[in-house]
Image (cartoon, rainbow, N blue to C red):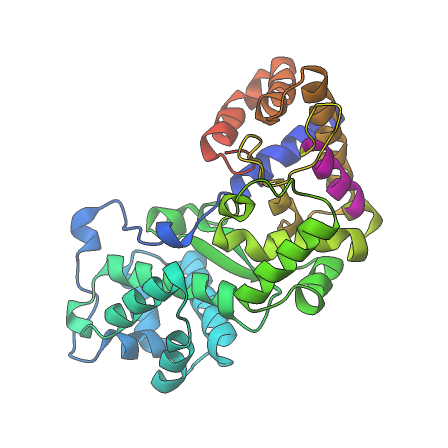
């Protein structure tokens, strides 16, 4: 890619990677309804036994329409989820049930109960859509309640079209960047309630909220840990990460004389903190910082509270210089991954 389009190209690829998925969105069936209702089992054992068995998992994944690298990716994802929830890639029934039963809060508690119901189904009645739902739910729970914070969710469509087409919503992989992994493992709390407490304390002490709003309602539950990562950057991040943090703060600043910052403002509903889970290298971090500072400056000059229009104006200017980027730009707007 030409140098002039470097930052734009990074933005295009990352916007596809960061499409959000929440607890309320986990029940996705494959597009072929008849295929989705097809039973995966041939015996009378419970679905739980099939999921826990290596051979049973392989058979279910194959019956879900995946093969090769896509099938291997789903096996890896399930293994990561099991390991993070129970400490073992191949947990016993008791270990998995125990780890799930310890989850009781709100929507996560309801999702837990749904998973336990699905896992109690007989294998012969367990459908493809239910298997996909279980995998999605287990990975979401592992990301929220697992012991290893360095495993990060990503949208399946950015890794493999077949995964997304068959209803799998997540991949689940180790964060590669050493600085980011250190923060996730050693700074960000593991338990959801402690994460929320950490977020509230840091929003207040860093003066990143006006505190006049129910600001945490703007933060999806699946984003809590990466948002805590974002709040840890001023103290623990690399120089390039700190530069990007400051650029996001500028995007979050109101254009009036007081210049207050609210990073969870429903009138400026960006989700730029997701960039810190994307394993950006130094050049990409710097490119994003330059772009976001330009976006913030443009919006301030026009006295715009919300920065979404300025963000798109910046990208539209790039498209005007290279029409081949138009389709990708439309995908960014459709995904709404960084601006709602």
Residue 29: give x, y in percent of width and height: 27, 51
> Considering the image in quadrants, where does the N terminus appear?
top right
- Compared with residue 75, is residue 37 higher up or lower down, i.e. above or below? above
Residue 287: give x, y in percent of width and height: 75, 35
Count the marks. Answer: 0
Farthest residue in the right direction?
Answer: 239
Q: Is residue 126 left or right of residue 254?
A: left
Residue 282: give x, y in percent of width and height: 78, 45
Residue 239: give x, y in percent of width and height: 84, 48
- Compared with residue 119, is residue 31 higher up or lower down, i.e. above or below? above
Residue 57 location, quadrant:
bottom left
* Residue 151 or residue 44, whichever sits in front: 151
Q: What residue is shown at x 69% (from left), y 36% (from top)?
A: 261
Q: Magenta-highlighted stretch: main secondary structure? A: helix
Q: What residue is shown at x 49% (from left), y 43% (from top)?
A: 19
* Residue 62 or residue 255, whichever sits in front: 255
- Compared with residue 246, is residue 5 higher up or lower down, i.e. above or below? above
In the rendered image, residue 179 lying in the magenta stretch gets the answer: no
In the rendered image, residue 249 lying in the magenta stretch gets the answer: yes
Visible residue check, residue 163: yes
Please provide the residue range marked out in magenta.
242-251
* Residue 108 or residue 140, whichever sits in front: 108
Visible residue check, residue 168: no
């Amino acid at each position: 890619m030409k140098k002039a389009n470097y930052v734009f190209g990074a933005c295009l690829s990352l916007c596809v990677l960061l499409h959000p998925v929440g607890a309320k969105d986990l029940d996705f069936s494959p597009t072929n309804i008849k295929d989705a209702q097809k039973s995966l089992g041939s015996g009378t054992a419970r679905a739980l036994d099939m999921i826990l068995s290596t051979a049973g998992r392989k058979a279910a994944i194959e019956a879900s329409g995946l093969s090769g690298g896509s099938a291997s990716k789903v096996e890896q994802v399930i293994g990561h989820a099991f390991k993070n929830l129970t400490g073992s890639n191949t947990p016993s029934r008791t270990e998995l049930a125990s780890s799930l039963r310890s989850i009781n809060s709100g929507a996560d508690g309801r999702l837990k109960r749904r998973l336990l119901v699905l896992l109690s189904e007989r294998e012969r009645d367990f459908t493809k859509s239910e298997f996909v739902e279980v995998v999605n739910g287990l990975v979401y729970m592992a990301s929220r309640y697992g012991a290893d914070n360095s495993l990060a969710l990503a949208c399946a469509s950015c890794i493999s079209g077949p995964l997304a087409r068959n209803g799998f919503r997540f991949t689940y992989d180790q964060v590669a960047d050493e600085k980011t992994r250190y923060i996730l493992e050693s700074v960000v709390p593991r338990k959801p309630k402690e994460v929320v407490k950490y977020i509230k304390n840091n929003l207040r002490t860093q003066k990143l909220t006006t505190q006049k709003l129910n600001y945490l309602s703007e933060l999806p539950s699946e984003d809590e840990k990466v948002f805590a990562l974002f709040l840890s950057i001023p103290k623990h991040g690399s120089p390039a990460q700190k530069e990007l943090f400051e650029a996001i703060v500028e995007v979050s600043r109101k254009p009036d004389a007081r210049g207050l910052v609210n990073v969870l403002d429903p009138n400026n509903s960006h989700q730029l903190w997701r960039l810190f889970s994307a394993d950006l290298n130094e050049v990409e971090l710097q490119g994003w910082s330059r772009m976001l500072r330009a976006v913030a400056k443009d919006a301030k000059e026009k006295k715009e509270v919300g920065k979404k229009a300025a963000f798109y104006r910046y990208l539209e200017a790039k498209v005007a210089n290279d029409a081949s980027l138009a389709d990708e730009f439309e995908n960014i707007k459709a995904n709404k991954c960084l601006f709602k």
